[in-house]
Image (cartoon, rainbow, N blue to C red):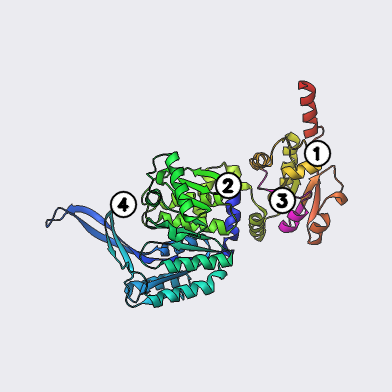
């Protein structure tokens, strides 16, 4: 996964709508100092200095999706109590609709209290009910899911075994998703995964996968066998097993396993990491990323989440920065057209004059560099439209290019005179020019103004064409001919 892909992903993520169904709870954090022992018993005394309430359980999945920029709705059941009202207020404050959160007077809203001192949990106190839904409330949940599932891009089931995801609710969600043609992702619990039959993908951790398969996972062989058992029993097309410090493994019916190593980070708290994985995986799938790319996105997101204390969310900026660390600085200059169009519009609003040029730039040489430097001096920003490999082959023959498009893009992006590189598939850059609307269209001096593609378009909104002279005798063809002459 590269920065260019993830920036385009976040550029369109607001079009995604997700439905989360599952067990809601409040996560309470009491932060304090533990500097003495109680005279009453051999236990630490914690002086509380800060209190915080966070959305937990399925609420943390909702929170993660919301932070990523996804439009999200939640369907669940809470008690008619103070904690239930606090949950509703938290969702309303985030702009998440609560019309599908049903109140049950016989139910207790789950609340987990964690006492934290010196970056460590001292104790956790759980107050909750685990009983299954009443027949009446269960039917209301099922009716809502049946009526509204088609409005979403994807459905997520977050199961904490607190009673909301009854067999009937699960089967209703799966049937409604199947009818709407949308995927269902489930973070499972317990040992009987068969109740999730019909899901698109499950995301158990290693311990859960061991319990469900009956196989102790000790190495790659046992991991593959455990995955095979689960996929056969549940009838899955995909399975993602999270393995803590060993990363994740994605299994699919029609592809080889993909083992994704973890990103090296200091781990402070794994609470809620599974929620982050589920949210990021769902967002990736709904946005059109491939299954493996979605899993890599989930892996990166989880790595960020566990570096924070408590159930935490991950932001687009954090994910983009994490991916950028794995690449050179030049990677930040290579953009997809949808992202670049937004950036350039903002640069124009700040008064920057935008120059555009294009070419194959196969075997970069001094003539290329001097041309690009001259083009950059015409304005404040230089955008380079780079012909894709397929486009170069159509223009220059099947033996070209000698250097692939990704390598060419990185070499060019490393030049100070170039601000952005965008690869295009067409034979001409007219579509790029139309989208970016540069002030100046630069081409080599071997062209005539009338022969420059995009001239009429640029001049129609007040821009202009500039012809830039090349250095004589410098060309890729000449370099190829000298190599053949000397080494043939």
- Quick check: 181 above or below 469? below
Q: Is residue 475 visible?
A: no
State which mark lies toward you, 3 or 4: 4
Using the numbered discs, state the Cα–Cα distance from disc 1 to disc 2 in whole angstroms: 29 Å
State which mark lies toward you, 2 or 4: 2
In the rendered image, residue 430 lying in the magenta stretch gets the answer yes
Nearest the eye: 264 or 285: 285
Is 69 left or right of 169, judged from the image as shown?
right
Q: In this figure, which residue is indicated by the disc labeled 2?
A: 2
Number of the label disc, if any, that sits on residue 119:
4
Q: Residues within 10 Å of mark 2 (few under 14, many from 20)?
A: some
Do the residues under discs 2 and 3 have CB atoms within 8 angstroms?
no
- Quick check: 7 above or below 417? below
Is 248 left or right of 13, judged from the image as shown?
left
Q: In this figure, which residue is indicated by the disc labeled 1?
A: 397
What percent of the width, then of the height, locates residue 71? 53, 66
Q: Residue at 67%, 58% (x, y): give it.
A: 348
Looking at the rendering, which quadrant does residue 160 occupy?
Answer: bottom left
Q: Residue at 42%, 64% (x, y): give it.
A: 58
Q: Sequence-wise, which precedes: disc 2 or disc 4?
A: 2
Q: In this figure, which residue is indicated by the disc labeled 3?
A: 379
Q: Residues within 10 Å of mark 3 (few under 14, many from 20)?
A: some
Using the numbered discs, state the Cα–Cα distance from disc 1 to disc 4 in whole angstroms: 62 Å
The secondary structure type at the circle numbered 2 is: loop
Using the numbered discs, state the Cα–Cα distance from disc 2 to disc 4 in whole angstroms: 33 Å
Magenta residue span? 417-440
């Amino acid at each position: 996964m590269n920065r260019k892909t993830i920036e385009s992903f976040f550029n369109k993520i607001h079009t995604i709508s997700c439905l989360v169904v599952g067990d809601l709870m409040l996560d309470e954090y009491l932060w304090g100092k533990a500097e003495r022992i109680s005279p009453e018993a051999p236990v630490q005394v914690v002086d509380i200095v800060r209190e915080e309430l966070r959305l937990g359980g399925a609420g943390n999945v909702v929170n993660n999706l919301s932070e990523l920029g996804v439009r999200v709705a939640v369907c669940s059941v809470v008690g008619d109590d103070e904690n239930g009202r606090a949950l509703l207020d938290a969702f309303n404050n985030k702009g998440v609709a609560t019309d599908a959160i049903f109140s049950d007077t016989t139910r207790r809203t789950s609340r987990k209290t964690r006492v934290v001192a010196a970056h460590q949990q001292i104790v956790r106190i759980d107050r909750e009910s685990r009983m299954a839904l009443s027949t009446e409330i269960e039917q209301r949940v099922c009716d809502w899911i049946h009526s509204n599932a088609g409005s979403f891009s994807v459905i997520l089931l977050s199961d904490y075994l607190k009673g909301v995801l009854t067999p009937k609710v699960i089967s209703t969600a799966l049937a409604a998703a199947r009818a709407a043609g949308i995927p269902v992702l489930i973070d499972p619990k317990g040992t009987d995964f068969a109740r999730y039959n019909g899901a698109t993908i499950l995301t158990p951790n290693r311990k859960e996968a061991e319990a469900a398969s009956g196989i102790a996972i000790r190495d790659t062989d046992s991991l593959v066998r455990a995955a095979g058992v689960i996929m056969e029993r549940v009838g899955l097309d995909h399975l993602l097993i999270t393995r803590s410090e060993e990363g994740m493994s994605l299994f699919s019916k029609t592809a080889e396993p993909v083992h994704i190593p973890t990103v090296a980070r200091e781990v402070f708290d794994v609470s809620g990491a599974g929620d982050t994985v589920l949210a990021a995986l769902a967002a990736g799938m709904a946005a059109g990323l491939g299954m493996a790319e979605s899993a890599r996105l989930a892996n990166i997101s989880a790595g960020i989440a566990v570096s924070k204390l408590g159930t935490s969310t991950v932001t687009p900026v954090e994910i983009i920065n994490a991916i950028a660390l794995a690449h050179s600085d030049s990677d930040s200059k290579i953009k997809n057209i949808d992202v670049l169009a937004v950036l350039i519009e903002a640069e124009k609003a700040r008064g920057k004059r935008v120059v555009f040029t294009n070419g194959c730039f196969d075997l970069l040489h001094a003539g290329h560099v001097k041309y690009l430097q001259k083009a950059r001096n015409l304005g404040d920003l230089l955008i380079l439209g780079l012909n894709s490999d397929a486009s170069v082959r159509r223009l220059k023959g099947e033996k070209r290019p000698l250097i692939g498009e990704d390598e060419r893009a990185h070499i060019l992006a490393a030049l100070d005179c170039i601000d952005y590189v965008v690869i295009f598939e067409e034979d001409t850059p007219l579509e790029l020019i139309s989208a970016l609307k540069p002030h100046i269209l630069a081409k080599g001096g071997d062209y005539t103004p009338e022969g420059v593609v995009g001239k009429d378009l640029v001049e129609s909104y007040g821009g202009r064409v500039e012809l830039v002279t090349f250095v004589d005798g410098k060309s890729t063809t000449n370099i190829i001919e000298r190599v053949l002459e000397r080494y043939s």
